[in-house]
Image (tube, helix red, strand yellow):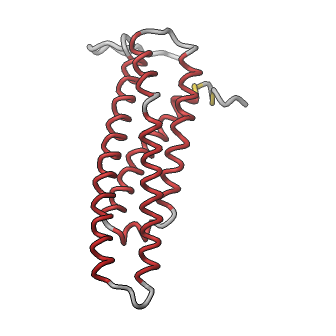
Amino acid sequence: MSLTVVNGLPVHVLIVHVVVVFVPLSSLAAVVGAIWPSAARRMGVVLPLLALVTLASVPLATEAGEWLEGRVDSNALVRKHTELGDGLLPWAAALFVLATAIWWTTRRSAAAESRPGRSRAAGSRSSLALRIVAAVLCAGVAAGAVVEVYRIGDSGARAAWHDSFSQSSKPHQETND
């Protein structure tokens, strides 16, 4: 079994679907967790694990894409797609770091709140400030990651489909078997 081809299809075209689904999903989960601590508590360890799967899928898609790049005609569209694809890993890494930080701080703050003798007012102010910073960072990274996935996907679709279809409808030929 080859890790480069599955059922005759380059594995890159399959793995990119994981990236296309998981980057926005991880982004949304991180932003929701940063804004809404009870949601982050409910997500629990799923939040950083989701971001970890996202992070792991990016180099897999990139590596499979590099294999595929060596087997298709090189043109400006393919080169642009490859160049854009190389830029997603830092966004996915930042998403993972933020998701892990949200999980960790939410987990720690829930444990700290349950301890007796803690000043709620001081803890509440610092917690709110931390949540605002985390929400702003998450929103920025999430937007950047999703936009980057869109740009990469658009360039990949253009590279794959340019000159491969007609703008006008072609008559279907019926076959008599």
Please provide percent x and percent y for residue 58. 51, 37
Please provide percent x and percent y for residue 135. 30, 57
Q: Is residue 75 above or below residue 54?
A: above
Position of the N terminus, as image quadrant, is: top right
Task: Looking at the picture, tell me which residue is in the foreground, 126 or 56.
Answer: 126
Q: Is residue 102 above or below residue 94?
A: below
- Tell how many labels: 0
Q: Residue at x 43, y 22 (%)?
A: 83
Task: Looking at the picture, tell me which residue is in the foreground, 162 or 100.
Answer: 100
Please provide percent x and percent y for residue 150. 34, 34
Q: Residue at x 56, y 20 (%)?
A: 68
Q: Residue at x 40, y 13 (%)?
A: 173
Q: Quadrant of residue 87?
A: top left
Q: Quadrant of residue 103?
A: bottom left
Q: Residue at x 33, y 85 (%)?
A: 119
Position of the C terminus, as image quadrant, is: top right
| Residue lying at the far right of the rendered structure | 1
Image position of 68 (left or right of 77)? right
| Residue lying at the far bottom of the rendered structure | 116
Q: Is residue 30 above or below residue 153?
A: below
Please provide percent x and percent y for residue 95. 42, 48
Image position of 115 (left or right of 147)? right
